[in-house]
Amino acid sequence: MSIPEPGDTAPDFSLPGLVVRNGTRTDDEYALSAVIGRPLVLAFYPGDATPVCTAQLCSYQEELDDFADLGAVVWGVSPQALDSHEDFARGASLSFPLLSDTGGDVARAYGVRAPGIGLRRSVFVIDADGIVRWRHVGLVGLRFPKAETIREQVEQLV
């Protein structure tokens, strides 16, 4: 599929995911339709515990309170299984949901699946009505948008 443009309806999805808070892992099903009414920062990343992915998601963790103050939810999505996500969340002290797209269906729906590398490092800001308002899709996996840049995009929605 093609990459959704700003102004397009975000593809709906449902994925298993987990969150680790206060040392406790909680598994759940995460669906875009369940967060309609709140902005969503949807961050696709290639791999758990890799240097660039760790830097990216840790930078979002540092801004998590600011995102929450704006009413926004942050979710990370990658192709690894939940046990890998748990190890990553614990090792990097991440307290937002990490979703498991092992089949790549959601990455395909968002047009960020890439042969050879799995998926392109990408971030979508989706508004409270489920519309894509901003996106960053990397051609290679070494660069990612700063949390401050994403926060500025979310601020425009509230």
Image (cartoon, rainbow, N blue to C red):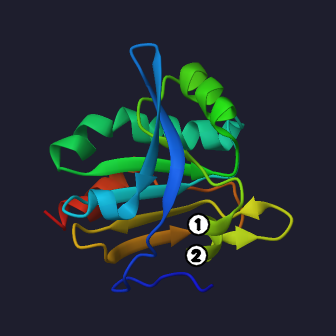
For the residue labelled by badge 2, is the local secondary structure a helix, a strand or a loop? helix
For the residue labelled by badge 1, is the local secondary structure a helix, a strand or a loop? helix
Q: Residue at x 23, y 73 (%)?
A: 129
Residue topped by disc 1: 106
Q: Is residue 89 above or below residue 136?
A: above
Counting from the top left corner in percent of width and height, residue 72 is at: 25, 51
| Left or right relative to 75: residue 51 | right
Quadrant for residue 28, please give it: top left
| Left or right relative to 112: residue 36 | left
Query: Number of marks in the image?
Result: 2
Choose between 32 and 147: the one closer to the eye. 32
* Image quadrant containing the C terminus: bottom left
Quadrant for residue 107, please give it: bottom right
Query: Are the two marked residues, 1 and 2, in contact with CB atoms closer than 8 angstroms?
Result: yes
**Three-letter code, disc 2:** Ala
Q: Is residue 91 above or below residue 125?
A: above
Q: Residue at x 33, y 64 (%)?
A: 33
Q: Residue at x 16, y 42 (%)?
A: 69
Q: Assess disc 1: are there few (<14), some (14-19) or many (≥20) residues with their C-alpha within 10 Å of its C-alpha.
A: many
**Three-letter code, disc 1:** Val
Q: Is residue 51 visible?
A: yes
Residue topped by disc 2: 109
Choose between 21 and 114: the one closer to the eye. 21
Q: Is residue 26 above or below residue 144?
A: above
Counting from the top left corner in percent of width and height, residue 67 is at: 26, 46
Choose between 13 and 127: the one closer to the eye. 13
* Image quadrant containing the N terminus: bottom right
Q: Is residue 139 visible?
A: no
Instruction: Using the numbered discs, state the Cα–Cα distance from disc 1 to disc 2 in whole angstroms.
Output: 5 Å
Badge number at residue 119: none
Q: Assess disc 2: are there few (<14), some (14-19) or many (≥20) residues with their C-alpha within 10 Å of its C-alpha.
A: some
Counting from the top left corner in percent of width and height, residue 124 is at: 44, 66
